[in-house]
Amino acid sequence: MKFPRIVICFLSIFLYSGWQTTQAADPNIIYILADDMGYGDIRALNPDCKIATPHLDQLAQKGMIFTDAHSSSSVCTPTRYGVLTGRYNWRSRLKSGVLWGLSRRLIEQDRLTVPDLLKQHGYHTACVGKWHLGMDWTLKQGGFATEKSFNKKTNPGWEVDYSQPIQNGPNSLGFDYFFGISASLDMPPYVYIENNRSQGIPTVTKAFFRDGPAHKDFEAIDVLPRITRQTVDIINQRSSAAKSGKPFFIYFPLNAPHTPILPTPAWQGKSGINAYCDFVMQVDDTVGQVMQALKKQGIAENTLVIFTADNGCSPAANFKEMADKDHQPSYRFRGHKADIYEGGHRVPFIANWPARIKAGTRSDQLTCLTDLLATAADIIGAKLPDEAGEDSVSILPALEAKATAPLREAAVHHSIRGAFSIRKDHWKLELCPGSGGWSFPKPGKDDLSQLAEIQLYNLNDDAGEQQNVQHLHPEIVKDLTTLLQSYVERGRSTPGKPQQNNGTVNIFEAGKSAQKLKKPTKKRQKAKS
């Protein structure tokens, strides 16, 4: 059957316009943040990986792998601050370490966040999972819980009035909806939170590592399945609106495979290696459930799914057990969670967006998890104000394979003790002796007095950071130190008006403190334990 030319022209224009509309529509965005998962724990990234990760492998096969992606810190809270604000954590009040389950809110009241930005542009925003960025719990005698108002060992939260609304939580930072837990599952209180309310009053004491108030029905092993179901439910509920032009953003920070390492019975023993590897397989299944929900609802094509981790694998995963089975969570990189070495902050990063990302692609762009804010702004065509996203760079050109030059000038890394590192091109400068974290040489445990105060590595030749060449390249040490100091003084590492840091930032402080530490005596070690 032949159609008149005018009809064919009309149909062509109609179909082309529809295609253009589809292409131009703002995507749904799902950001899955695994907790303490190594670069080497995914087969698509590590050809020698001994853990089966079929769903993450498929995500990579149909999307893009970033081989040089990094968390801004090698521990939980600071990385999460950077993810949501596009600002390095050491610019905030948190200069080292992490928050606790009853710590006060960390993100500043007037700071633009990813959900703030997307909500302003018509997105429905939700956070499901482990928050770990502080919120203000009301005390029974009035006022809010602080680090000094409760004793983590003898009275870790019983003075909180759990019947009262929680102030300054995720809902105050741009999220329309929140369901999850306040911090890690080794930090009380052990209760679910929905929006600004504790779901039940703690009446019993439970613990993995730290005793604390818990709801009688709360079990750590149930958390990953529960938050997975909640995320799938949101996808199902929001799919119609998404098809009608109101996209959604889901920030999905997992509690796994962080301690307590508790895979459900269905996954126990599945890896044939150890419980941590079983838990990684359950994380992989969580990703599979999310992708299946998107496919079932017919919205996978225009949904950007990013899977990454807040830092490297924790030593609690038992590296020896895994090494005995030839599995290396940190892949070929040195160190692990908490460290300034690559194993502490080089993380898996997979992006899948069928409408815009070509399947089976890779990017070697230096990327930081602070880049989400600028990337989201670029996707929706928004301009960030000078006082937002000071350390955020859009990776949209990389996602669309249009980047012809490095997108980032450099990236700054931070260890649990507050040690600094800066990476530019293939050079990495570390302003501390030893790991700056938990691996050997460890500050406070191993003798660092004979080590150089700074370290410089050529990652092209020495990805495992074995040969400190700082004495051979003093000019590079000077240039990188000057660049890092300029980032501190300008309050930003991106173009724009200079901004203020929260408090004083000394890039050498942690390194000098570590240099002074001697190996503890047996007496001191015993007292500490």
Image (cartoon, rainbow, N blue to C red):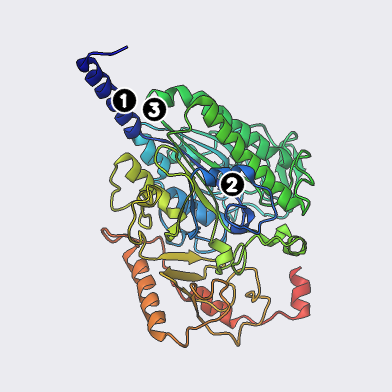
Q: Do we see residue 488 in this rendering?
A: yes
- Tell me where residue 210 appears, x and y as whole percent: 72, 52
Q: Nearer the viewer, mark 3 or mark 2?
A: 2
Which element type, helix, strand or loop, lies under badge 3? loop
Which element type, helix, strand or loop, lies under badge 1? helix
Earlier in the chain: of badge 3 and badge 1, it is 1
Q: Which residue is mark 2?
A: 57
Horizontal side of residue 56 vs 123, given as left or right: right
Q: In the current view of this chain or complex, which residue is farthest to the top?
A: 1
Q: In the current view of this chain or complex, which residue is farthest to the front?
A: 1
Tell me the kind of residue under disc 1.
Gly
Q: Which residue is mark 3?
A: 246
Tell me the kind of residue under disc 3.
Lys
Measure how far apart labels 3 and 1 are at the Cα level. Answer: 17 Å
Earlier in the chain: of badge 1 and badge 2, it is 1
Quarter of the image with the C terminus is bottom right
Q: Which residue is mark 1?
A: 18
User: Is mark 1 in CB contact (under 8 Å) with mark 2?
Assistant: no
Q: Residue at x 58, y 52 (%)?
A: 44
Earlier in the chain: of badge 3 and badge 2, it is 2
Quarter of the image with the N terminus is top left
